[in-house]
Image (cartoon, helix red, strand yellow):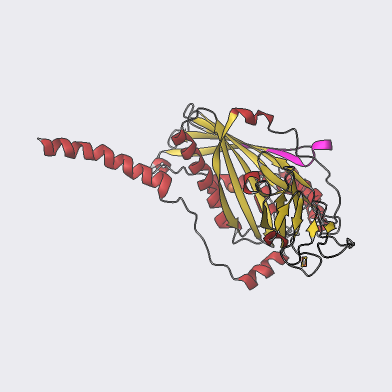
Amino acid sequence: MLFIVLFLLLIPVSVIAYFYYQIFEKHKDRKRIAFDEEYEKIRAQNYPPAFPNGWFNLCSSDMVEKGKVIEVEAFGQKLAVFRGEDGKVGVVDVYCPHLNANLADGKVVGNNLVCPFHAWEFGKDGKCKHVPYSDKVPNASTACWIVKENWGLILVWYHAQKALPTWDTEGYLTEMSDFKYHGKTTDILRIHLQDFAENGADHAHFAYVHNLMTIPFVEHIIDVKHTLEIVFLEGKEKHMAYFTDIASLVWKKSQKEIPRAGGHAKVTYFGPGFLVFQFTTEIGNVLLIKTFTPLGPLKLRMDDYVYAPKGTFKLAIKYLLREASAQFHDDIAIWEKKNYAERPVLVKGDGPIMKMRAWYSQFYGENEGVKDSAIVEESLLSTAENNN
Ligand code: FES
Ligand SMILES: [Fe+2]
């Protein structure tokens, strides 16, 4: 009798364990491919510049405590990020102008950064403030970066021609006070930032790449249908764009919608460096601040900072993140092996890819290889519009 009871119990436990493994564990890590560094250099030549202009995340605020300095890699160089006793963050190029020691190996004294080699002191403006063995302070400095701290992130302004910021990061996501932080994930991707942005405008790939859910067997009875829209803002907020995806679940056979089963994703792009992804479903909502820090040509760091409204079930958060990352991993598998189609052949149903490129071109300098795209855009857009 006991044996039968145990056996009967084992069935649901095994089923739950199977589904848990399939949904949460089996494809947790995306497929990694080996990269030929030499070929990557050739692939990168076809793409627009590796570092578009904008605000970029260097690291989380909590990674730089008061009186501490860390080294961060970004934009093909190394930066020293330090926090003075006044609580404010300074970011400077890592090499000391004296004899090029690494300032990130130094220490913070007061609000200055002290070089580990001969103890020259530098302020947050990058200028030398003190030399311990000389009465005179030399006119020496290391480049300093424009810094902001928002949403628990240390952001710097990158501009290829060193122009000042054209937009601000403040005033957004004020509703975050109702959200709880649930940690972050980090990944290194071999992609160009622009390919990510084009994702929202490339409507045709959704039906092929994002048509499955992570729940086993479901694909045999349910289809995912995407209704997509992208809006490019203008004027003072022209650095922003909104992308929305209403993902409905329909029965495969009848194509009838399953009520209250889908999800609604809203992505707000803030320039090329970061976006906010809000995923709203019947089982809960999650909000990701997704940041991209370009490290070099076709190489960037992606950080996902996870938030959910207070009181959201942990398993619901876990499942929604799993669905979101599974979709994203499918994209990455393509982006990491693709090239840049400067003159794509577009047809009806492709989505506003060239409008996205035109919007994105504001993040490059005038002579940075986007003119060809603009010419192609006009001819192809008119063709696509005629087809519509
Ligand atoms: S190298 Fe920095 S003080 Fe000499
Ligand atoms: Fe995609």
Q: From the image, which quarter does the N terminus lie in?
A: top left
Q: Nearer the viewer, residue 371 or 145?
A: 145
Q: Position of residue 231 (x, y in %)?
A: 72, 37
Give the farthest residue toward the left.
1
Q: Position of residue 125 (x, y in %)?
A: 83, 52
Q: From the image, which quarter does the C terminus lie in?
A: top right
Give the farthest residue toward the bottom.
38
Identify which residue is drawn at 55% across, 56% down. 333
Q: Magenta stretch?
A: 228-242
Q: Nearer the viewer, residue 330 or 307?
A: 307
Q: Is residue 179 above or below residue 162?
A: above
- Residue 148 can be seen in this image: yes
Q: Is residue 321 above or below residue 74?
A: above
Quadrant for ligand 1 reads: bottom right
The image quarter containing residue 368 is bottom right
The image quarter containing residue 228 is top right
Side of 181 where 1 appears, left or right: left
Residue 115 magenta: no
Q: Is residue 265 above or below residue 46?
A: above
Side of 213 where 117 appears, left or right: right
Q: Nearer the viewer, residue 206 or 313?
A: 313
- Residue 351 can be seen in this image: no
Residue 231 magenta: yes
Q: Position of residue 8 (x, y in %)?
A: 19, 36
Q: Nearer the viewer, residue 221 or 213?
A: 213
Q: Position of residue 87 (x, y in %)?
A: 72, 42
